Image: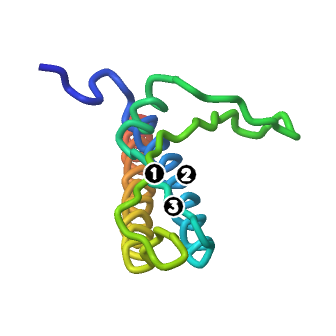
Amino acid sequence: MSVPFAGIKTDRVLVAAMKTADINHNMIANNLANVDTPGYSATELDFERTLRDMLEDRGGIALRTSRPRHLDFETHRPQFERIAFLSKNDYNKVDLDDQITKLRMNTGKYTMYAQLLSKHFEMQKNMLNSLVR
């Protein structure tokens, strides 16, 4: 039996989860922007697969940096699937209520990951401060 994130640092998992949630947010925003586009089908991110790919360093490209102190993060290609179970007269398959719900859930996930990462660093800072005293 394999443990999902065994051997991977907590901060790396949380940063990758935040990046994945950001990609998901952009995809949902794109779906919302195209709610009235005839023939548009909503795209949906496979969150778990994209996160796993990020953690396994698959499918990424390096970002350009304009200053040497910029962080060197990678952008990963999201794994997504098209859903087409609902269609309006103009063959648009975006369900506004569904996309708003997904946006709220994704925002909650991102906030939770950010708070956990902040708490993780706070705990490390407290541990280091206790060693200095």
Image quadrant holding the N terminus, namely: top left
Query: In which quarter of the view is residue 84 placed?
Result: bottom left
Q: Residues within 10 Å of mark 3 (few under 14, many from 20)?
A: many
Q: Which residue is mark 3?
A: 41
The quarter of the displayed image where residue 22 is located: bottom right
Residue type at mark 1: give it.
Arg
Q: Nearer the viewer, residue 34 or 8?
A: 34
Question: As drawn, is 69 to the left or to the right of 45?
Answer: right
Q: Residues within 10 Å of mark 2 (few under 14, many from 20)?
A: some
Expressed as whole percent of the image width and height from the top left, the position of residue 83 reads 40, 56
Pointer 1 with pointer 3, Cβ within 8 A? yes
Residue 39: x, y in percent? Answer: 57, 66
Q: Residue furthest right?
A: 66
Above or below: residue 99 compared with residue 68: below
Q: Which residue occupies the foreground of this view, 48 or 87?
A: 87
Quadrant in the rendering for residue 125: top left
* Residue at 51 percent of width and 64 percent of height: 28
Q: Is residue 59 left or right of residue 84?
A: right
Specify the label residue 82 is tagged with. 1
Q: Is residue 95 depicted above or below 41 in this figure?
A: below
At x 39% / y 30%, what residue is drawn? 9
Give the amino acid type for the residue marked by disc 2 in the picture.
Ile
Quadrant the C terminus occupies: top left
Which badge, 1 or 3, comes first in the chain's sequence? Answer: 3
Where disc 1 sits, the SS reads strand
CA distance for labels 2 and 1: 16 Å
What's the mark number on residue 111?
none
Q: Nearer the viewer, residue 5 or 49?
A: 49
Residue beneath the point at 38% across and 36% down: 49
Circle 2 is placed at which residue position?
23
Q: CA distance from mark 3 to mark 2?
A: 18 Å
